[in-house]
Image (cartoon, rainbow, N blue to C red):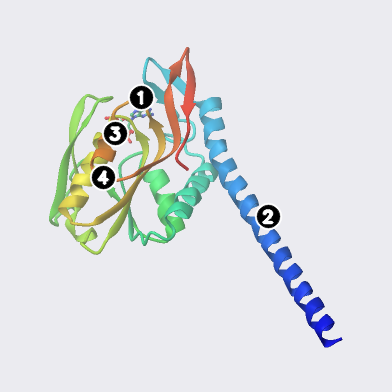
Amino acid sequence: MLEIGRASLLDTVMSNNKQREGLFAFWREVFFISRKLDMDSLISRIKQDGTVLGADILKVDSFLTHQVDPKLMRQIGKVFAEKFKDAGITKVVTIEASGNVPAAYVAEELDVPMIFAKKAKNVTMTDELLTADVYSFTKKITSTIQISRKFLSETDNVLVIDDFLANGQAALGLISILKAANTKISGVGIVIEKSFQTGRALVEETGIPVFSLARIAGFDQGQVVFTEADL
Ligand code: G4P
């Protein structure tokens, strides 16, 4: 009698555990799908509002590089934060101007400061500066980017965020500043990667992983052709 009671109690506990596991798997699935959907919304937005200019430029000034869609930026912030939530990130670093927007949302989600490298020195920048020369293939100019030494230390663990990865010069400039400051660099997070350009390979050659939310394989008759994204 006691044995039967114990067996049925065990059955009940087991079935409760199974239900709990089932419920956990269900919510994990819902969360995964909603995360996936978030970045589907970036892809849809590029398809809907992006304009291909010439052979290799994508204009996304209606939601990312000029006018900004804060809801989409918040989703972007959440996806990167989810990826790096256990990495011990202490700073998010980017380069002005358009990098500032996604980077600020990622930093808010991770609850850490965001630093943007400046392209021009102003009168308030009286502290020691870490600098790197960055050549822009699209603008055909070299700018010296700079970050105040006092904002970076050897104990920092940095996530680099930028809006575009094209030829990788901006990301490499940031990496060289971060290396000079002896910080850890956990990754480079990119909103739109043009995978047909050299940037990703150049960054990966430094040993730092790249995570792009949208990866463009190329342009075909004014249409964007995507390849599989990282997140
Ligand atoms: P890199 O960013 O990988 O170094 O490549 P590149 O030198 O080609 O890019 C220079 C600038 O042009 C960067 O902005 C980059 O974000 C932007 N860019 C590159 N390709 C595209 C593109 O297809 N579409 C758009 N909209 N921008 C592109 P920046 O110099 O940092 O300037 P800012 O515009 O953020 O101020």
Q: Residues within 10 Å of mark 1 (few under 14, many from 20)?
A: some
Q: Position of residue 144 (x, y in %)?
A: 17, 39
Q: Mark number for residue 201?
A: 3
- Mark 2 or mark 1: which is in front? 2
Q: Residues within 10 Å of mark 2 (few under 14, many from 20)?
A: few
Disc number for residue 26? 2
Mark 1 or 3, nearer chain start: 1
Assign a secondary structure to mark 4: loop
Residue type at the position of mark 4? Gly
Circle 4 crowding by C-alpha within 10 Å: few under 14, some 14–19, many from 20 = few
| C-alpha separation, residue under disc 4 versus residue under disc 2 | 36 Å
The picture places residue 93, in percent across and down from the top left corner, at 31, 50
Mark 2 belongs to which amino acid? Phe
Counting residues from the start of the chain, the first of labels 1 and 4 encountered is 1
**Residue identified by numbered label 4:** 207
- Residue at 28% x, 39% y is 204
**Residue with the mark numbered 1:** 196
Which element type, helix, strand or loop, lies under badge 3? helix
Q: Which mark is residue 129?
A: none
Q: Quadrant of residue 27?
A: bottom right
Q: Label 1 CB, ligand 1: below 8 Å? A: no
Q: Amino acid at mark 1?
A: Phe
Percent x, y for residue 153? 21, 61
Mark 4 vs mark 3: which is more N-terminal? 3
Identify residue type, mark 3: Ala
Whole-Å distance between the Cαs marked 4 and 3? Answer: 10 Å
Measured in 3D between alpha carbons, the distance from the residue under mark 1 to the one under mark 3, in whole angstroms, is 10 Å
Q: Marks 1 and 4, Cα distance to the nearest angstrom?
A: 20 Å
Please say if 49 is above or below 78. above
Q: Nearer the viewer, residue 1 or 89?
A: 1
